[in-house]
Image (cartoon, rainbow, N blue to C red):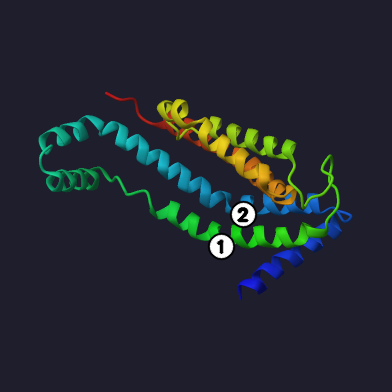
């Protein structure tokens, strides 16, 4: 079943390449953008829900601090009190939509990566890239910069997180893509480009929510 799935994606990629006059590079980018746009409503909803949960937890911080002090010597009572507080204010675990998104994306992404790896094995050049089956340093740097832009625009990340771990995912992305084939990097670049759009849309939604929210007493 898995090989049939991968072969099907590979066949679709070949058809896209024919549409783009034999360019596997454009086919990979088109597939990446199409997949991310199809999943965009789901991922955008999950990210927006995460922001709302984060905002609720920020409002509850004084009460959470008091509970931590009150039950400092009883972790079980502390956990129970926190759960009661969360239920009272409608704070969910945050795993539902995020888990569903991961369940959908993981096998799809693995299948697409396997199909691209097979399809670009004999593919030629694209733009400045001499061979899509080989790594390309400039493309890896481009993917890392797109990852940085997506994180910089992400409104769900706190300022503390920005200063502490902002660069870590970018560095990890650069290290990983540095050794990937250019074909896989192109897919990563296309998906990350849509990720930048997602962060911008999420920022816009959150700003609208803040503007529509009643002022605090």
User: Which residue is depicted at the point 76% across and 61% down?
Assistant: 119
Q: What is the distance, in whole Å, between disc 1 and disc 2 at their CAs?
A: 15 Å
User: Which residue is depicted at the point 48% across and 47% down?
Assistant: 45
* Quarter occupied by residue 89: top left
Q: What residue is disc 1 on?
A: 107
Residue situated in front as seen by the camera: 6 or 176: 176
Q: Earlier in the sequence, mark 1 or mark 2?
A: 2
Q: Position of residue 135 (x, y in %)?
A: 73, 45
Q: Position of residue 43 (x, y in %)?
A: 52, 49
Q: Which quadrant is home to the N terminus? A: bottom right
Q: What residue is disc 2 on?
A: 38
* Quarter occupied by residue 75: top left
Q: Rate crowding at label 2 as few (under 14), some (14 to 19) or many (20 or more) other CA atoms within 10 Å.
A: few
Q: Position of residue 206 (x, y in %)?
A: 47, 34
Does the rendering let one see residue 197? no
Residue situated in front as seen by the camera: 177 or 63: 177
Q: Secondary structure at mark 2?
A: helix
Circle number at residue 190: none
> On screen, 135 above or below 206?
below
User: Which residue is depicted at the point 29% across and 45% down?
Assistant: 91
């Amino acid at each position: 079943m898995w090989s049939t799935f991968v072969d099907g994606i590979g066949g679709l990629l070949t058809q896209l390449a024919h549409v783009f006059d034999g360019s596997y590079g454009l086919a990979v980018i088109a597939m990446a953008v199409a997949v991310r746009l199809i999943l965009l409503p789901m991922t955008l909803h999950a990210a927006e829900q995460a922001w709302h949960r984060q905002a609720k937890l920020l409002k509850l911080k004084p009460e959470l601090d008091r509970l931590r002090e009150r039950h400092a010597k009883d972790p079980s009572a502390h956990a129970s009190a926190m759960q009661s507080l969360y239920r009272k204010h409608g704070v969910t675990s945050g795993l539902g939509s995020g888990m569903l998104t991961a369940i959908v994306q993981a096998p799809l992404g693995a299948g697409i990566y396997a199909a691209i790896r097979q399809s670009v094995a004999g593919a030629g050049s694209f733009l400045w890239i001499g061979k899509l089956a080989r790594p390309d340093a400039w493309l890896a740097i481009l993917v890392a910069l797109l990852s940085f832009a997506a994180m910089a625009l992400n409104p769900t990340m706190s300022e503390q997180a920005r200063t502490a771990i902002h660069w870590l995912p970018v560095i990890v992305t650069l290290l990983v893509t540095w050794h990937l084939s250019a074909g896989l990097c192109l897919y990563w670049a296309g998906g990350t480009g849509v990720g930048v759009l997602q962060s911008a849309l999420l920022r816009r939604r959150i700003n609208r929510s803040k503007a529509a929210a009643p002022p605090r007493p």
